Amino acid sequence: MIDGRLDHGEWALCAGFVIETGTKRGRPPRDHRRVMDGVLWIARTGSAWRDLPPHYGNWSTVYRQFLRWSDAGQWRLLREAAKAAGSAELETALAAVCALPGRRKAR
């Protein structure tokens, strides 16, 4: 990781897990690497989502994508892939992401 952002090798490991394929309808996909860097920033700093620096994108867009990937179990899969690849720094960062609160369940 460089300054808390994914380097090219780490992104190559992660890209296959987070880039959505399928229909060509709706809004065009966002920059998934920038979104992932934003989620990692939140996990690293412990800041509120609304405090996300704008160069990572709109905070609500990053948060919604975090929730989608959380619901799909992508963070756990990414962490396992990082561990298998021997990327201790990325695995540690993803462990922090896995600890972020996701959706609140209805009571």
Image (cartoon, grey):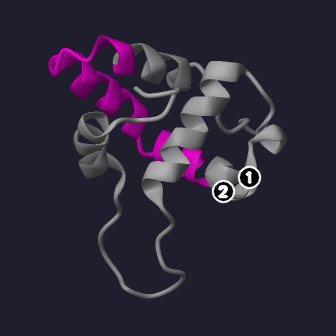
Q: Which residue is mark 2?
A: 57
Looking at the rendered structure, the number of numbered marks drawn on it comes to 2
Residue 42 is situated, as x and y percent measured from the top left of the image, at 66, 31
Q: Residues within 10 Å of mark 1 (few under 14, many from 20)?
A: few
Q: Secondary structure at mark 2?
A: loop
The quadrant holding residue 88 is top left
Asked if the magenta segment contains residue 66, the reply would be yes
**Residue 35 % position (x, y):** 54, 50
Dominant SS of magenta comes to helix
* Quarter of the figure with residue 45: top right
Range drawn in magenta: 64-90
Question: In which quadrant of the rendered image does the C terminus lie?
Answer: top right
Q: Residue at x 73, y 36 (%)?
A: 104
Picture coordinates of residue 70, whole percent (x, y): 50, 40
Instruction: Find disc 1 in the rendering and name its residue.
Output: 54
Name the side, left or right, on which 95 lies relative to 79: right
Q: Disc 2 residue type?
A: Gly
Residue at the spot x=51%, y=23% of the render?
Answer: 98
